[in-house]
Amino acid sequence: QVRLVESGGRFVQSGGSLRLSCAASGRTFSTSTVGWFRQAPGKEREFVACISSSGGDTWYEDSMRGRFTISRDNAKNTVDLQMNSLKSEDTAVYYCAARNGWIIGHITPMNFAYWGQGTQVTVSS
């Protein structure tokens, strides 16, 4: 089992940058694919990005590619999400999630088994 705790969410001006971090514990973290999702008010939770257990492979939602970068440090048991050129529509609660095995394509929350509690990101317009 993997336990996940997100941090780094805060208020930021449009056009700014923010780095979210997901701290994990559990024996299987180093072998888990880790992803970031987000959920805006009144909307469904949507996929942002994921990274393979080794960190060698990444996959992004098309609209996030180029602005967001996911990375991991297995020595520290952390997965980060660097977000640049933030827009008001990026306002959401951001969640870290983990699963066994790599995945690409159309990714939904159902594809991930373990979840953190989320961290709020608010981008001013």
Image (cartoon, rainbow, N blue to C red):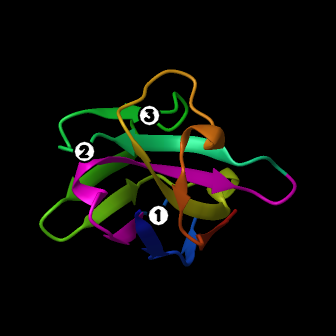
Q: CA distance from mark 2 to mark 3?
A: 15 Å
Q: Earlier in the sequence, mark 3 or mark 1?
A: 1
Secondary structure at badge 1 equals: loop
Secondary structure at badge 2 equals: loop
Residue highlighted by disc 1: 16
Q: CA distance from mark 1 to mark 2?
A: 29 Å
Dominant SS in magenta: strand
| Residue at image point 17% right, 71% down | 76
Q: Residues within 10 Å of mark 3 (few under 14, many from 20)?
A: many
Does the residue at mark 2 contact the one at mark 3 (Cβ under 8 Å)?
no
Residue type marked 1: Gly
Residue 25 is labelled as none
Q: Position of residue 11 (x, y in %)?
A: 59, 77
Residue highlighted by disc 2: 53
Q: Earlier in the sequence, mark 1 or mark 2?
A: 1
Q: Is residue 8 above or below residue 36?
A: below
In the picture as drawn, the residue positioned furthest to the left comes out as 75
Residue 60 is labelled as 3
Q: Is residue 100 visible?
A: yes
| Residue at image point 65% right, 65% down | 93
Residue type marked 3: Tyr
Task: Provide the residue span drawn in magenta.
Answer: 18-42
| Magenta residue check for 22 | yes
The answer to whether 30 appears left or right of 51 in the picture is: left
